[in-house]
Image: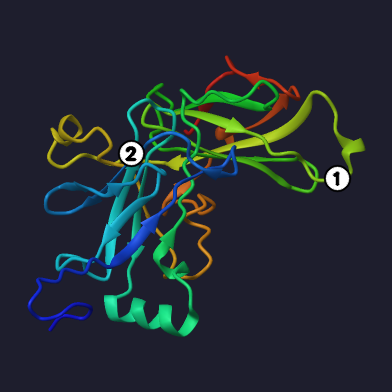
Amino acid sequence: MNQFVAESYTERIDKLAVGFEPLDPLLGGRLTRAVRMEVEGNPPRAAIDRHHSCLHVLLYQPSLKDSVVVRVWEASRWYVPRRMRIPLLTAAEAELRQVTQKTVAHRVRRPVLFPGAAYDANGSSTGLRGRVVRGDGSPVRWARIEARLPVGNVLVGRAHGDDRGEFFLLLAAPPPPATDLTDPLNVRVTAFGRLVPPVPVPPDLPGEDPWWDLPEEQLAAPGDPDPAAAGEVMPAGWASTAASTRIIPFRLGRVLSGVDDFKLV
């Protein structure tokens, strides 16, 4: 039975399952560069439709279950890729919420994509380009970085590492009082990662999928606050070691590079 037109017409209704608005933490808003979003499954990675506004749309279809695993990436290393498991409402549940709550917030996800090695920050940014390695010098893939002030343990920055162990950490302005700021500003930087790297199965998996071990992050239920989407939740099993924590003297308004590698041993 048609819902909107006479039975003499063929009617097709596409309903939004989830819309994606990836965010840039430095810009504080929507990405200005195109990224690719894919649903993992069968076929292995099916592209999610992208609009010219940099919004991505996944429509309800028979193959959708109660959640989807989505990978977001781009080839230039401007952003670090992410993999997220996203809970979904059924089409009936989504329609009911829209009628009763008069909002579509439960159908929108705003994952934050963190700067990659190729990210070009503005000239006034305070940051650090670095790398996380193991004892044998091999990269710690998909590391996470936290920057905190030694006094008060105040968080002033987060970063995600890539498959080569490289990260680009940008500091937010520390909280008042501004009179406490010094140049250089000492910040405690800690790298987190898998203490034991996973083993690919089958062994040739990295050749087929270079991001085979990208961690799967569990996002919140539709409509709930979502710190995982914001990149504020460590993946399960990520840890730090004594050698992966250092005090770094940041120069305000400058991006540091060439510092010794952080070691997860």
SS at mark 1 in the image: loop
Q: Residue at x 46, y 25 (%)?
A: 117
Residue identified by numbered label 2: 197
Q: Give the crowd class for mark 2: few <14, some 14-19, many >=20 residues within 10 Å.
A: few
Q: Residue at x 60, y 44 (%)?
A: 28
In the picture, which quadrant includes the N terminus? bottom left
Instruction: Locate residue 238, reporting x and y percent.
Output: 45, 47
Closer to the camera: disc 1 or disc 2?
1
SS at mark 2 in the image: loop
Instruction: Locate residue 149, reporting x and y percent.
Output: 74, 40
Residue type (three-letter) at the residue carrying disc 2? Pro
The numbered dot on residue 176 is 1
Depicted 10 relative to depicted 55: above or below: below
**Distance in Å between CA atoms under marks 1 and 2:** 40 Å
| Residue sitting nearer the eye, 191 or 65 | 65
Q: Residue at x 48, y 56 (%)?
A: 228
Of the numbered discs 1 and 2, the one sitting upstream in the chain is 1
| Residue sitting nearer the eye, 237 or 28 | 28
